[in-house]
Image (cartoon, rainbow, N blue to C red):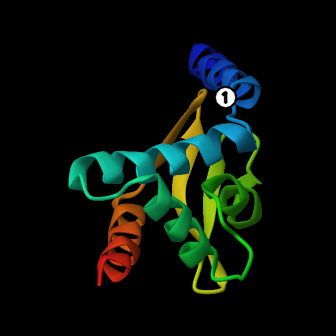
Amino acid sequence: MKNNLFFLLLIALIGVFTNPSLEKHQAAVAEKVNELGNINGEVDGDTIKKLGALLGEAIGLNSMEKYLNNNVKVEDLKVISLTKLKMNGTYKTVGVGAFGKVFLFDDVKSYIDEKVEALKE
């Protein structure tokens, strides 16, 4: 029993020190957008800028970097962290960060796909 408790505390301690930063969460979202562009083959750099402005739903956002800075935030739960993306005016949890990695949920892909399809029309 003592060994199990020690093992859990050790994992929790490692989780605290390897919790991903905001920059890693932002990079994961940007990578997902770039990945979608590569898959579809029809999204170029200009379209990604338009996508950043469209997703941000604000005038003046003309680059993915600005979009990420204004619309991606992290909820730090010490051992893990949650990636939150502003969608339609509210923040929605779209991923989890733990042990230095960020894992995005599939609904982020479908949301971005919708926005890219709207740009193509």
x then y, percent, for residue 104:
45, 51
Q: Is residue 41 above or below residue 87?
A: above
Whether residue 79 is visible, yes or no, is no
Quadrant of the rendered structure where residue 13 is? top right
Q: Nearer the viewer, residue 91 or 9?
A: 91
Q: Secondary structure at mark 1?
A: helix
Query: Relative to residue 29, is residue 83 drawn left or right?
Result: right
State the residue lying farthest toward the top: 3
Instruction: Give the residue drawn at x 73%, y 37%.
Output: 21
Figure quadrant of the N terminus: top right
Query: Relative to residue 121, is residue 8 drawn left or right?
Result: right
Figure quadrant of the C terminus: bottom left
State the residue lying farthest toward the front: 46
Instruction: Give the residue drawn at x 67%, y 35%.
Output: 20
Whether residue 27 is visible, yes or no, is yes
Q: Is residue 51 above or below residue 104?
A: below
Instruction: Give the residue drawn at x 59%, y 41%.
Output: 27
Count all numbered tags in the image, as a single digit.
Answer: 1
x then y, percent, for residue 81:
66, 47
Q: Nearer the viewer, residue 14 or 97?
A: 97
x then y, percent, for residue 8:
61, 25
Q: Residues within 10 Å of mark 1 (few under 14, many from 20)?
A: some
Name the amino acid type tagged 1.
Gly
Q: Is residue 21 above or below residue 55?
A: above
x then y, percent, for residue 6:
67, 17
Instruction: Give the residue drawn at x 47%, y 43%.
Output: 31
Residue under label 1, please give it: 15
State the residue lying farthest toward the left: 40
Quadrant of the rendered structure where residue 3 is? top right
